[in-house]
Amino acid sequence: MACRTCGNRLRKTARFRCHLCYPETVLLPSGGLERSGEPPGGGGSSEPSGGGPAREEIFVSTREWEQLEPELAELTAEDRAFFHEGALAVTLERAHSYAFDEARREDLNAEVGWEVLDDAEEQRRRDEALLGAQMLARALQGATARGSLRPELLADAFGVACWAIGVRAGRGEIVSEERLSLLADIRLRFVIGMAMPVVASS
């Protein structure tokens, strides 16, 4: 038993999903991305106990998801709209740039106010952001190659993730490490902690 802000029971499978893991376990796979299989130490692993990464495509479109999960769709409408209305493409482009272009990476670091500090904490943050961007960029490449990419459901995933940790999409705020750590998927942490503030302020 749980209140409607704790989680949802998926009407197509009857499985219960906590809202903190819902974007990773339901919407990203429905959007075509494999679960991250993130290595230990990165804030939690989403790798299934049976071995490698897996996909569980539950929904085939935003419309279907909204029809079957109307309460969650209503609660997250404003946050999802930010990504549906143009921010998704910019977010994904910045993830690719951050992952593979060193000069662009430093530009994006500067845009979110990261100083170049020679200490372990600063290096950890940079390492996590780079890993998250690389994992997202490669997952997108794989989904595109498979023909399984559904961008609208990725927009939903990012919006629901913002709502789940109490961050309003599109306000350009720098999200605290404490809030980001609530999300197990390192790709979502990159989007909300690095790409989204830059997109919102540009």
Image (cartoon, rainbow, N blue to C red):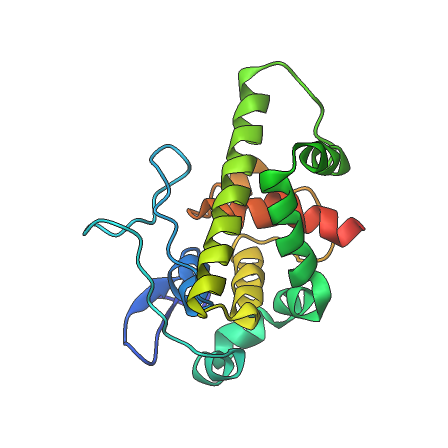
Which residue is the extreme one toward the right?
202
The residue under the point 37% across, 60% down is 25
Which residue is the extreme one toward the left?
50
> How many circles with numbers are drawn on the protein?
0
Give the image quarter of residue 56. bottom left
Residue 82 against residue 51 in the figure, above or below? below
Quick one: 29 or 104, which is closer to the camera? 104
Q: Position of residue 156 (x, y in %)?
A: 55, 68
Residue 2 against residue 61 in the figure, above or below? above
The residue under the point 51% across, 50% down is 136
Side of 201 where 190 appears, left or right: left
Residue 156 against residue 62 in the figure, above or below? above
Q: Position of residue 74 (x, y in %)?
A: 57, 76
Quick one: 101 or 195, which is closer to the camera? 101
The residue under the point 63% across, 41% down is 98
| Residue 51 visible in the displayed image | yes
Q: Position of residue 15 (x, y in %)?
A: 28, 70
Side of 121 where 23 appears, left or right: left
Side of 35 where 160 appears, left or right: right
The residue under the point 48% across, 50% down is 138
Q: Quadrant of the N terminus?
A: bottom left
Which residue is the extreme one toward the front?
145
| Residue 175 visible in the displayed image | no
Residue 53 against residue 80 in the figure, above or below? above
